[in-house]
Image (cartoon, rainbow, N blue to C red):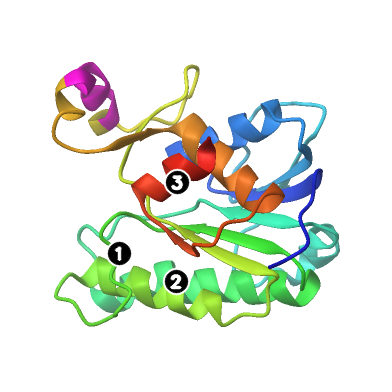
Amino acid sequence: MADRLSKFRVIITGVTGMVGEGVLLECLENDAVEHVLVLGRRPYGVTHPKLEECIVKDFTDLTAVEEKLRGYDACFNCAGVSSAGMSEAEYTRLAYDMVISFAETLARLNPKMIFTHVTGAGTDGTEKGRVMWARVKGRTENALTRLPFGEVYAFRPGLMKPTPGQKSIKTLYRVLFVLMPIVRLFTPMLTMQQVGRAMIHAVTRGSDKRVLEVVDIAALAQ
């Protein structure tokens, strides 16, 4: 297990999506996080004393910004894309090839880094199931564990309650938010604060589990 850090610097991706934005907001409020570098294709549009943005066009070629990526203790990789309407080859290019290329660059620049990758409930770690997206995500999880990071964590959240003030909330989640009391009766649900806090604790405390399901994320968030 990597040496635990009481303070750390982190790279976050996917902040224009709900998960990335929720994790970012939690990091900005947490004293353990000293500095946040947001890496994305378009600006997030928020200023904060410990927030820096870096715009990149291609996550498979970070040559132009490599120097900015050095000196970080952790990465919370929250970027993701829906598989709806995609072939397996198309989805693999986005959810596997791009992620692994990005992670390989970070592992080379910051070999002690703790890398946390958001996949999803139902991800297939055997890579042999019938559900295409689950196989691809499982393949990505497995490949990440083979990279020379300090530690790698795969987060598999299910339904999540957004943080108050979030801008990036899908219509489905707006509906579910209204139906929250009913939805909770049928499926476990996390808050975005729990997800963000659990990621922070993965760095400052660590976890015996490298693949974290909903109940594991909730426990690590405490």
Mark earlier in primary sequence (1, 2): 1
Q: Which residue is mark 1?
A: 123
Magenta-tinted stretch: 173-181
Please name the amino acid that badge 3 sits on: Ile
Please name the amino acid that badge 2 sits on: Glu
Q: Is residue 53 left or right of residue 85?
A: right
Please name the amino acid that badge 1 sits on: Thr
Residue at screen point 43% across, 40% down: 218
Residue 123 point in image, percent of width and height? 30, 64
Q: CA distance from mark 1 to mark 3?
A: 15 Å
Residue 162 point in image, percent of width and height? 41, 27
Q: Main secondary structure of the magenta part?
A: helix
Mark earlier in primary sequence (3, 2): 2
Asked which quadrant contains residue 43, the reply is top right
| Total numbered circles | 3
- Secondary structure at badge 2 equals helix
- Secondary structure at badge 1 equals loop
Residue 81 point in image, percent of width and height? 37, 55
Q: Quadrant of the N terminus?
A: bottom right
